[in-house]
Image (spheres, rainbow, N blue to C red):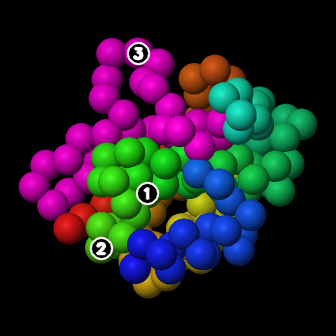
Amino acid sequence: MSSEIDARLASLGISLPHAAAPAANYLPYVQSGNMLHISGQLPLENGKVAVTGQLGAGVHTADGQRAAELCAVNILAQAKAALGNLGRIRRVVKITVLVSSTPDYYEQHLVANGASNLLAEVLGDAGKHARAAVGMASLPLNAAVEIDAVMEVA
């Protein structure tokens, strides 16, 4: 299974980065039994927040979708750091997508599709999940999106 996942990542042109260290007093992930909880991941690319600002105030839905994809890539990087290989993921149970947005922006669900689509493409059926997409006034480091995840693992 791990080699299939690696092949899917390669076909998408994705190379997983090193898992980001926490920016404060928390753990990047916690495993309890067969559940892996991954702390909120920002849209980091090459060590920097790639998409900043608010959706509806200069940041467009397509930019938000890209930010969500980057968050999903970083979730996978954390999962690999926790598990050693992504083939141990049995199911992405739920993701929570936090979208920095203006009060009149209503496309948080479309932004969230960036992450949902990528997880399903990379992990197949194991990547299909429940989710919440929520608008926020602001996020750490002025990130446009932050996503956390809960996974069932072997």
Can you tell which mark lies on residue 95? 1
Front residue of 109 and 140: 140
Q: Which of the two labelled residues, at mark 1 and mark 2, occupies the earlier sequence position? A: 2
Residue 32 is labelled as none
Q: Nearer the viewer, mark 3 or mark 1?
A: 3
Q: Residues within 10 Å of mark 3 (few under 14, many from 20)?
A: few
Label 1 and label 2: CA atoms lie apart by: 15 Å
Q: Which mark is residue 90?
A: 2
Q: Position of residue 45 (x, y in %)?
A: 70, 38
Gap in Å between the C-alphas at discs 3 and 1? 21 Å
Numbered range of the magenta stretch: 17-44
| Badge nearest the viewer, 1 or 2 | 2
Please, which residue is most extreme toward the right here?
Answer: 58
Per the image, label 2 sits on a secondary structure element best described as strand
Q: Position of residue 136 (x, y in %)?
A: 58, 36
Q: Amino acid at mark 1?
A: Ile
Residue 92 seen from this side: no
The N terminus lies in which quarter of the figure? bottom left
Q: Which residue is mark 3?
A: 24
How far across and down, in percent of the image, does residue 26 sit? Answer: 31, 23
Q: Is residue 97 above or below residue 12?
A: above
Q: Is residue 98 magenta?
A: no
Label 3, secondary structure: give it.
loop
Element marked by disc 1: strand
Sequence order check, earlier mark of 3 and 1: 3
Three-letter amino acid code of the residue under disc 3: Ala
